[in-house]
Image (tube, rainbow, N blue to C red):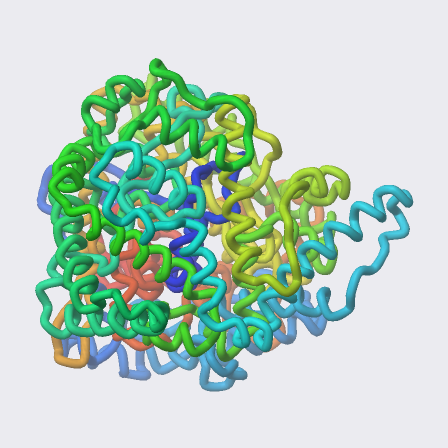
Amino acid sequence: MNYKNLHIILAFIAFALVVLSSPIINDESSVNESDTEEEIIGENSVAEVLSNGETSDEPIDLPDITNAVNETNVPPELNESVINPEFNKTAIPIENPNTSDEICDTPECQEVANKILSNLNRDVDPCEDFYEYACGNYGKNSEKIDGLPEDSMFITLYENTLTVKESFEEGYKANEKLSPEEQEYDKKNFEKVLNFYNSCMNTEIINAKGVQPLLELLNKLEINENRDKYNGVEDLTNLLVKLSNINVNIFFKELVFQNLKNAKNFSLYLGQPGIGLPYANHYEDPKLASDYKGIMKTVFTKVFENQKERNIDNMVENIFEFEKKLLNILENYGQPLNKAFVEDNSALFFTVPNHVNENIESLNKSNSFIDWKNYFNNRYENLGLKGTIVNDDSIITVITPGYFEKLNSIIKETNSTIIADYAEWNVIKTYSHYLSSDVRKLFGNYLEDFISPDGMRDLYCIFLFNNNMSMGVSKVYVDKVFGEDDKKNIDIMIKNIRETMNKKISELPWLDDITRENALKKASSLTHEIGYPDFVINPKELYEYYEGLEIDSSEFLNNIINNVLYENARSFKQYKNNKQDQNAWIMASYLPNAYNNPTKNSIIFPAGILKSPFYSSSYPDYLNYGNIGVTIGHELSHGFDNNGRLFDYEGKFVDWWTNSTSIEFQNLSQCFVEQYSKFYLTDKEGNKHNVDGNNTLGENIGDNSGISRGYEAWKLSLEKDPKAKENNKSLPGLSEFTHDQLFFIYHAQDSCNNLSEEEQIKTLSDEHPPSKFRLLGTLSNSEYFAKAFNCKINTPMNPEKKCKIW
């Protein structure tokens, strides 16, 4: 769930704030404010290999566009054609380009036309490398923002945060349409959100306190005071209760989430944690190991400078070796680390085939390092809740039982003092983000934030709202920018795109009647939400949602911790009551993103993405469908990718496929796996780093289906909309292009960025391929694109054999 490049943004944010991700609740209806990762947005895809729509048993002959990006990875014969301005060698001349004589002469149309023209590189043949053609001059004429990558998603996120900031600076403004009582609630809601922001912005107080807030937290936890007792079940249980309540998950993470067999109910899940360095082989790399140990030693020396009795060198070595053991069992018995339980906002990691259901009594026998009944009940009680939450018969779903089996052995053979040192290190690295600048600097790049707390502090503080009071800040944002007319327009687009999906499902030859009927039922049952959750704009309901959450404008770290405690308590209450309290989303509405929630069969579009450049009511429809329309198609298609297809029309995790169509889906998917695995980036040493076609399968299915659904829905709107001519006027200065071509050009320019290959290599473990490969892969599979640009068959952007599922 992030469309285009937000995954890069959230990767940085998640790395910096992973501590607060996944307190214990993770569905959009019972979202945990501490969750960081966004995406329930995953996709997968397949290949309908022959261009006539029929499948083939012959080997897949994929085009060589995988290397057609820059001279470091482009074959010589391709370089020659890409840089040749006479690119009509591969593109058939186009006649009568204009489909409308009327010109849109509004300022908005003039501005977007200028942007389109300024990004184009006309020296490149669009049938050879459409990314370079559409984006070759991106950034050369645009205004640069210090500290931010040149990327449309980053820039939009920057603009949206400025909108929130402006609201804070203007102060509360009463809505005259509200009653006096509603205005009072509305004001209190605004002030609570503002107090959190101010606590983050008050660097004078934060820096004056230094490491003291962290020491106070460690004193409350009393880890060191009991360091010799953690080989006992009771004391280790009590330690993990205190740590888990503040989202310091040293051995495992737990989650309250919808029951996969019945999405109306909630269940408890256990999964694996994150570890210091992301991969076990990093601990064998001399430089990485030395740097990591050096950070630990420096930080411990600062934090414990008045505790001379500590043997810091010994602590560092013990932690390092213990983490190596944990990483080893994670890699061998857990989930793949790039798909681990740390990916909080996704139901998709529950599709791990080996998960098991155990009652508390059985769990105590198989994983006896703690008392699980006391663990859950004590957590519940320590969060200020009355009663108990589990009994001996309560069912817990263990996502990676192999990991827990090995963990049980490791903990029992580990010295208590090592457990204590490891616990303290996790508390320190989790909450040092929110301390003084001198403490954060001790971590070097280890606590790397997307926005530096010491640079663009205001934007950094607003980013934190995605994990803290996200629904509260959503109200601040939508009050400022979002209108009901936009909501109505997006609603129409979604209905058109769903109609095209239904048509496609009805026509696909590889679906049998049973699977086709189930797929149509799922597509027809799909729900959608636009802009914000409804309760956000109800002052009393929003007030009650955050009632009990204490926020102090001078206590930044305490505010972070209070939010974590509050969200964990709310999650447990929902599990206890088997009922959601509000239809909260997994992300704040100011984020330019969208996602699919498979357990609700629902797609969600926050207000932050329903604005320029992704959408504008002032733009021609062919631009809106080429951008936000494709995004809508992408999210809808996630319900039918390699993960989403495992959930039925009610969001239940059940198999609604026949064996034959399931096998056909897997066969078609392999085409995408092979196609995208050929894309690669080159580092400074000349080493190639390939995209993982298996890891990116879901997103690639979504992209490929999304572009088709967006295009078909635009064509459908031309037939259905009585104002179609008025809504599809030509843009000034672009008369040489057809509206069909502008659909694809504008879609492509959403992928433009100036990120270096080195920067993009860092994102290769993400489920989204780098943007240029997403674009090249998708459009080379699109017959609509090839026809729009009259690309000759077997040119890089129009291979004879194409990958296709939906």
Q: Is residue 197 placed above or below 641 in the rendered structure? A: below
Q: Measuring 60% from the left and 47% from the top, which residue is drawn there?
A: 718
Residue 517 appears in the picture as rendered: no
Q: Is residue 541 placed above or below 741 in the rendered structure? A: above
Counting from the top left corner in percent of width and height, residue 119 is at 46, 77
Counting from the top left corner in percent of width and height, residue 251 is at 26, 43
Q: Measuring 53% from the left and 62% from the top, which residue is drawn there?
A: 463
Foreground residue, 334 or 522? 334
Foreground residue, 388 or 529? 388
Q: Measuring 45% from the left and 81% from the top, which residue is drawn there?
A: 139
Position of the C terminus, as image quadrant, is top left
Counting from the top left corner in percent of width and height, residue 69 is at 26, 73
Residue 530 appears in the picture as rendered: yes
State how many labels appear: 0
Q: Where is residue 492, by image quadrant?
A: top right
Foreground residue, 330 or 262? 330
Q: Residue furthest front?
A: 309
Q: Residue furthest top?
A: 393
Counting from the top left corner in percent of width and height, residue 410 is at 13, 41
Foreground residue, 330 or 312? 312
Q: Measuring 29% from the left and 22% from the top, which residue is drawn there?
A: 657
